[in-house]
Image: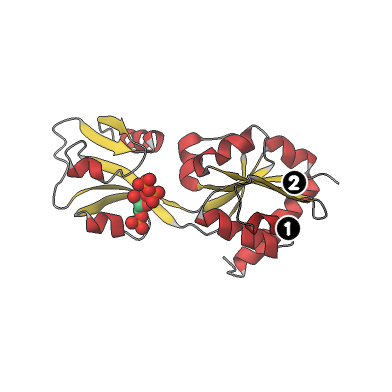
C-alpha cells in the first residue's frame, strides 16, 4: 500500500488537526509521545506525518515532499504555492487586518510605512487602493513597529484582538478572513487520488459535524 505523506503545522493548530485525522481513521499514536522526532508513521493505516514549520507547509506540498498538508489561508495567500486547496477545515479562524495607533488616520500625504510578516498580501491590498507604501518586513512582534514609530501601520493576523488592545492599537480595516485549509500536491492528487479523496471526505465530514 502507498503511504499518504502529511505535513502538519507544528503547534496547537497541528495538534488539533492531528486529533481530527486520528478520529477520521488515520491514527498514528507515536506522534503523541514526548520526543523530538519529526516523522511518524503507521504502516497499517498507510499514513506518515511530519511536523513542519507552519510557513513551510506549502513548500513541502508543492514540491511533493508531502502529498497533503494543513496550511493557513494567510500562508497560501502570501506564498502562493502551486497546490490544490481541497477543503476549508474551519479551524484556526482569524483575520488579516490593517492596524495602527488608536485615533491616528491615514492622511495619504506621505508614503505609508507598513510593517508586516506578509509583504505580498500587504502590497496587493494597498495596490488595490492605489496607495503608495514602504514595506518593512519583520518576523514577529509586529505590533511593536507603530508603537516605536518604525511604521505607521501593520498588516497582521488578528485572532482575539487582545494583542492590539493591550498595546493601544486598533483595527483600521479587515483585508481577508483566514482559516486552515487542507492542501494537496497536484501530482499526488492524481496518482493517489483514491487515498487522498477518501481521507479528505472523512475529514471534511467530521468538520461538518463540528468536531474541530
Ligand atoms: C500572532 C499575530 C498577533 C497575534 C494576534 O502572533 O501576529 O501578534 O498573534 O492574536 P490576538 O488577536 O489573539 O492577540 P504570534 O502569536 O504568531 O507571534 P509573533 O509575534 O511571532 O507574530
Name the residue beneath numbered marker 2.
4
- Quick check: 24 left or right of 83? right
Q: Residues within 10 Å of mark 2 (few under 14, many from 20)?
A: many
- 168 above or below 117? below
Name the residue beneath numbered marker 1.
26
Q: Residues within 10 Å of mark 1 (few under 14, many from 20)?
A: many
Q: Is mark 1 within 8 Å of ligand 1?
A: no
Name the image quarter holding residue 3: top right
Q: Quadrant of the C terminus?
A: bottom right
Mark sitting earlier along the chain (1/2): 2
- The residue lying toward the viewer, choosing from 24 and 166, is 166
Number of numbered discs present? 2
Report if the CB atoms under discs 1 and 2 are less than 8 Å apart. Answer: yes
- Quick check: 155 left or right of 30? left
State the image coordinates of residue 180 (x, y, percent, origin top left).
Answer: 53, 52
Asked if one can make out residue 157 in the rendered structure from this viewpoint, the answer is no
- The residue lying toward the viewer, choosing from 151 and 41, is 41
- 18 above or below 137? below
State the image coordinates of residue 108 (x, y, percent, origin top left).
Answer: 16, 36
| Element assignment for label 2 | strand
Name the image quarter holding residue 203: bottom right
- Quick check: 16 left or right of 178? right
- The residue lying toward the viewer, choosing from 64 and 80, is 64
Amino acid at each position: 500500500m502507498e503511504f499518504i505523506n502529511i505535513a502538519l503545522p507544528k503547534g496547537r493548530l497541528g495538534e488539533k488537526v492531528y486529533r481530527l485525522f486520528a478520529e477520521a481513521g488515520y491514527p498514528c499514536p507515536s506522534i503523541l509521545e514526548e520526543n523530538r522526532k519529526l516523522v511518524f508513521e503507521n504502516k497499517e493505516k498507510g499514513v506518515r506525518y511530519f511536523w513542519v514549520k507552519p510557513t513551510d507547509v506549502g513548500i513541502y506540498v508543492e514540491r511533493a515532499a508531502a502529498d497533503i498538508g494543513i496550511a493557513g489561508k494567510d500562508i497560501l495567500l502570501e506564498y502562493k504555492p502551486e497546490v490544490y486547496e481541497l477543503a476549508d477545515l474551519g479551524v484556526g479562524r482569524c483575520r488579516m487586518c490593517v492596524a495602527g495607533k488608536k485615533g491616528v488616520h491615514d492622511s495619504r500625504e506621505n508614503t505609508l510605512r507598513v510593517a508586516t510578516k506578509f509583504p505580498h498580501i500587504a502590497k496587493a491590498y494597498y495596490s488595490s487602493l492605489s496607495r503608495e507604501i514602504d514595506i518593512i518586513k519583520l518576523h514577529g512582534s509586529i505590533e511593536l513597529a507603530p508603537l516605536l514609530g518604525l511604521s505607521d501601520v501593520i498588516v497582521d493576523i488578528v485572532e482575539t484582538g487582545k494583542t492590539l488592545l493591550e498595546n493601544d492599537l486598533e483595527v483600521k480595516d479587515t483585508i481577508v478572513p483566514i482559516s486552515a485549509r487542507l492542501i494537496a500536491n497536484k501530482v499526488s492528487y492524481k496518482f493517489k487520488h483514491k487515498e487522498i479523496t477518501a481521507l479528505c471526505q472523512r475529514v471534511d465530514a467530521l468538520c461538518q459535524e463540528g468536531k474541530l
